[in-house]
Image (spheres, rainbow, N blue to C red):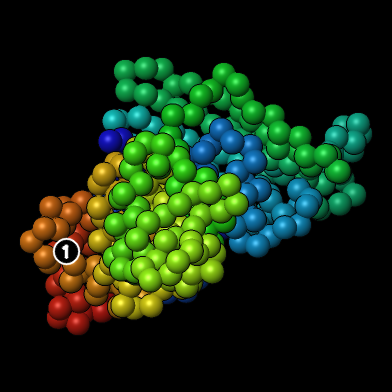
């Protein structure tokens, strides 16, 4: 499996510069609120889908930003300054490297003589104002495979309301796939995902995972009007959308991981909507399914009990092989060096939890 190994981020949201090295198959991101955990997930998401011009808009929508103008793209730029162009670079275990740069697109006024440069960048504005009229984003991306020359591409999204114009580069074919699960995600697409899984004859894996949290579920049925559960002692099928919040959150996570092999799944605030008693069952399912489908995981949490459950599970004999597949990263704001990350192996996590040593935040 080709894993994302390192990432460099520049001028994205709250990050001016951030470099994270040593990603593993299972990566847990921890830190205080507003430390940048979600922004790191979003940066990975953008890099993996770097050819998709609608993705920057989708990333903002994950935050609840539904303003239908190009101006909302400012929230991707560090300190909201358009000359702070977001840049991302990722190195993978197959020695390939990919980069992405987000460039603002401005409305052309046809008055070139009345324009001036902003610093050393190519951005220009009307001489009468300090706020460029941004109309969209250009995605400048490239990929360098080992032993091959670097290939460069561009795509764009332009807001020409009421129309949104996407210009996707048809010469580039994306080989990687990533899915982002927010802390408040529901199972709205679970039917489609589960149907795909059933077609590959892998439906039993999802069923066993759900039975870990609710042993009364006997079977799962993808029907035209939704996903239904068969429960013990109930004579008719029950729609999944009236099951408990924990079951629906659980269903969303496990079907997302199982839907597509050799992919990357990003889960923000994994503990949301789940009772403490379900955490070990969820970790069991996540580990089993990620191994079955060769999925690389990036998971954020700020809940110590969630980490304790993971630590407990990995202490069991049948999960010891997973210890080498896990890394934990703390994201912290430092006075001298800005935002930094600190990496812990399973042993480091285990020692910190068992000795009640504070994991650096």
Q: Is residue 110 above or below residue 123?
A: above
Which quarter of the rendered picture does the N terminus lie within?
Answer: top left
Q: At x 52% / y 45%, what residue is drawn?
A: 192
Q: Position of residue 346 (x, y in %)?
A: 18, 62
Question: In the picture, which quadrant includes the C terminus?
Answer: bottom left
Classed neighbour count for the residue bearing mark 1: other residues with Cα under 10 Å, few (<14), some (14–19), many (≥20): many
Q: Report whether residue 323 is seen.
A: yes
Q: Quadrant of residue 199?
A: top left
Nearer the observer, 276 or 79: 276
On the image, the x and y values in percent for residue 9 come to 46, 49
- Image quadrant assignment for residue 3: top left
Point out residue 184 in the picture as x, y percentages from the top left corner: 53, 66
Is 208 placed left or right of 354 in the picture? right
Residue farthest along the front direction in this orientation: 235
Residue drawn at x 85%, y 43% as measured from the top left: 161
Q: Is residue 286 shown left or right of residue 181? A: left
- Which residue position holds label 1? 314
Quadrant of residue 342 within the rendered picture: bottom left
Q: State the image coordinates of residue 7 (x, y, percent, origin top left).
A: 39, 46
* Residue at image location 51% in from the left, 55% down from the top: 227
Q: How many marks?
A: 1
x 34%, y 61%: residue? 218
Tell whether 110 sits left or right of 106. right
Give the farthest residue toward the left. 317
- The answer, for residue 341, to whether it is visible in the render is no
Residue extending furthest bottom? 356
Question: For the residue labelled by badge 1, is the local secondary structure a helix, a strand or a loop?
Answer: helix
In the rendered view, tell whether residue 316 sits above or below residue 170: below
Who is closer to the viewer here, 334 or 59? 59
Between 207 and 180, the residue placed more toward the observer is 207
């Amino acid at each position: 499996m080709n894993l994302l190994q390192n990432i460099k981020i520049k001028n994205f949201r709250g990050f001016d510069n951030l470099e994270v090295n040593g990603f593993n198959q299972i990566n847990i991101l921890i830190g205080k609120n507003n430390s940048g955990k979600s922004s790191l997930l979003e940066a990975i998401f953008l890099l993996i889908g770097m050819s998709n011009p609608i993705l920057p808009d989708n990333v903002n929508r994950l935050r609840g930003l539904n303003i239908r103008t190009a101006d909302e793209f400012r929230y991707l730029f560090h300190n909201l300054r358009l000359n702070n162009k977001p840049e991302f670079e990722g190195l993978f275990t197959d020695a390939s490297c990919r980069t992405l740069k987000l460039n603002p697109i401005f409305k052309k006024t046809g008055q070139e003589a009345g324009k001036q440069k902003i610093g050393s960048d190519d951005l220009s504005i009307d001489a009468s104002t300090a706020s460029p009229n941004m109309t969209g984003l250009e995605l400048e991306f490239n990929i360098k495979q080992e032993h091959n020359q670097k290939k460069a591409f561009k795509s764009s999204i332009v807001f020409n309301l009421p129309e949104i114009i996407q210009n996707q580069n048809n010469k580039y074919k994306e080989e990687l796939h990533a899915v982002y699960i927010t802390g408040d995600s529901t199972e709205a697409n679970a039917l489609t995902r589960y149907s795909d899984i059933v077609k590959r004859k892998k439906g039993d894996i999802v069923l066993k995972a759900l039975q870990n949290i609710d042993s009364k579920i006997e079977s799962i049925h993808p029907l035209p009007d939704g996903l239904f559960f068969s429960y013990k002692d109930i004579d008719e099928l029950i729609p999944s959308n009236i099951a408990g919040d924990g079951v629906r959150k659980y269903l969303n996570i496990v079907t997302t991981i199982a839907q597509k092999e050799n992919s990357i799944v990003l889960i923000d605030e994994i503990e949301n909507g789940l009772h403490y008693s379900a955490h070990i069952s969820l970790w069991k399912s996540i580990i089993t399914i990620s191994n079955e489908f060769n999925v690389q995981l990036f998971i954020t949490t700020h809940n110590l009990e969630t980490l304790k459950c993971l630590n407990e599970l990995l202490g069991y004999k049948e999960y010891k092989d997973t210890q080498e597949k896990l890394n934990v990263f703390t994201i912290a704001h430092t006075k001298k060096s800005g935002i930094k990350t600190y990496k812990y192996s399973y042993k480091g996590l285990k020692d910190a939890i068992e000795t009640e040593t504070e994991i650096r935040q």
